[in-house]
Image (spheres, rainbow, N blue to C red):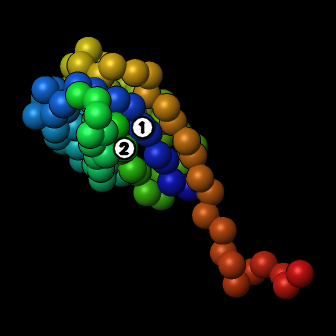
Amino acid sequence: MDCYIYYKSLVSNSAQICVEIGKIDALLRQQLLPTPKLQQFKEAKKQEITWMEIYANIDNDFIGQLNNVVNQTSLLNIITSDRHVELFENVDIRLQTSA
């Protein structure tokens, strides 16, 4: 299963977002947990960025562990929206039958 988490911040907070994600990365590494891949989408007409954290191959306990780590940072203080969490399960297409 993979986890996708997206949220918004002001463009002016971009550097601080990266610092806080770096802290999350370090804390997750200490616990031998999956670490984030970070992506961004700049909205030209707004002064906001949509951020996406991607965590690959997570287990069922990961979201609780991640929330504990995030709460040790200032990330929630600098984003301008909720953190939306989406979980996607892997599908082995070789095991799927033909229609």
SS at badge 2: strand
Q: Which residue is mark 2?
A: 52
The residue located at (66%, 75%) in the rendering is: 92
In the rendered image, the quadrant that contains the N terminus is bottom right
Percent of width and height locating residue 59: 53, 49
| Residue kind at label 2, given as amino acid type | Met
Inspect this view and state whether residue 78 appears.
yes
The residue located at (57%, 46%) in the rendering is: 87
- Pick the front one: 57 or 50: 50
Q: In whole angstroms, how far apart are the C-alphas of marks 1 and 2? A: 4 Å
In the rendered view, tell whether residue 68 sits above or below residue 36: above
SS at badge 1: strand
- Pick the front one: 17 or 69: 17
| Residue kind at label 1, given as amino acid type | Tyr
Q: Which residue is mark 1?
A: 6
The quarter holding residue 65 reads top left
Do residues under tags 1 and 2 come within 8 Å of each other at their CB atoms? yes
In the rendered image, the quadrant that contains the C terminus is bottom right
Percent of width and height locating residue 31: 30, 42
- Pick the front one: 51 or 60: 51
First-in-chain label (1 vs 2):
1
In the rendered view, tell whether residue 4 sits above or below residue 98: above
Disc ID at residue 68: none
The residue located at (18%, 30%) in the rendering is: 11
